Amino acid sequence: MIEVNEKNTKMWSNIGPRATYGLALLDLIEANSRVYALSADLGGSSGMTRLMSVYPDHYLNTGIAEQNLIGVSAGLAKEGLIPFASSFAPFITHRCADQIRMNMGYMHLNIKTVGLGSGVSMSILGNSHYGIDDMSFMRSIPGMTILSPCDCAELVMCVNAAAEYEGPVYIRMTGEPRMPRVYENGFEFQIGKANKLCSGEDVMIVATGSMVATSLDAARVLAQKGVETTVIDMHTIKPLDLSIFENIPVRCKLIVTVEEHSIIGGLGTAVAQYIASQDGLPKVLNIGLPDEYVKAGGYAYMLNMCNLTGDAIVHSILRKIEAGG
């Protein structure tokens, strides 16, 4: 398997998540002939240009037909193969919702779907290409596993783990080239097991995807203001690692969720649903994309407009604490 080390993670960060995905899948096919790459006419956009050249028999292009993409993937899975099907996040989820519901949900076939450009990273292409509610749909499918890597190194680990996992998986890719590195080296990645990145007793931030690095930035600013913060990398949205809410410090004032996804139906909803069923846990502050179709712009502009920057997260947390949680 491709090695997750400092040299590779630096290179992956520069080329971005989609190109990194293509390299990870190429390495998988070299190691396991059961793995197949599929695309709805987005092989290049999925970072698979080299893969298509080196292993043309392991790449299938269904054309701009996402419903067929899932149907062909289902056929491969029924034959004991491991299909990885990729398209832009709203296309790989909503356009083929019934095929996902039946083939990945009801039939529980071993299909791996990959949402490219989730969140608002498709920038000026606008709301038709934004993945603002893909997690909310995929979370509703019984038996679905959802992975949301925080950087390119964790994306490689997610791809490798998904290939070994028996069952339907959705990998949600946020970010763009020159994506901040959270991990310089690999760690013992385990589906369903969150990773604690730093510890503090005043606030717990549970973040996913691109917002993990941003939350670490926010935690450093909060520390300067006397607020000690725990930051959790919740790379698996379903099944959610509920063990992180055990033994929360008594003085913890707030649990904060941060995600590049709608505030409805994603990580924040999953965490709030659990917290509401428990006694004695802090209140929850959900930070995410607004429940609206926002004006399109460059990626950095979009994150700033949607208050998904380190400074904006700090401001939201301090305001909530000052208001009494």
Image (cartoon, grey):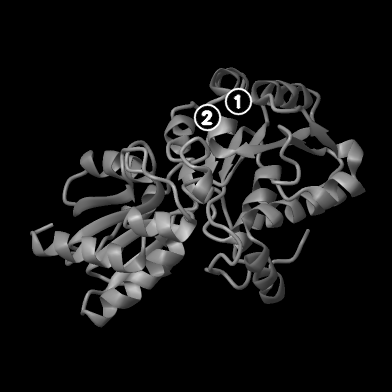
* Residue nearer the viewer, 89 or 242: 89
* Residue nearer the viewer, 188 or 141: 141
Circle 2: residue type: Gly
* Residue nearer the viewer, 132 or 203: 132
Give the left or right position of residue 315, taking residue 136 as reference: left
Give the left or right position of residue 245, taking residue 2 as reference: left
Kindly state the secondary structure of the residue where label 1 is placed: helix
Q: Which residue is mark 1?
A: 104
Q: Is residue 271 above or below residue 265?
A: below
Give the left or right position of residue 116, taking residue 275 as reference: right
User: Which residue lies at the image location 60% right of the left edge and 73% below the top edge?
Assistant: 184
Q: How many other residues sit within 10 Å of disc 2, few (<14), some (14-19) or many (≥20)? A: some
Give the left or right position of residue 203, taking residue 305 as reference: left
Q: Is residue 184 above or below residue 232?
A: below
Q: Which residue is mark 2?
A: 143
Q: Are marks 2 and 1 in contact (CB under 8 Å)?
A: yes
| x, y percent for residue 228 | 26, 74
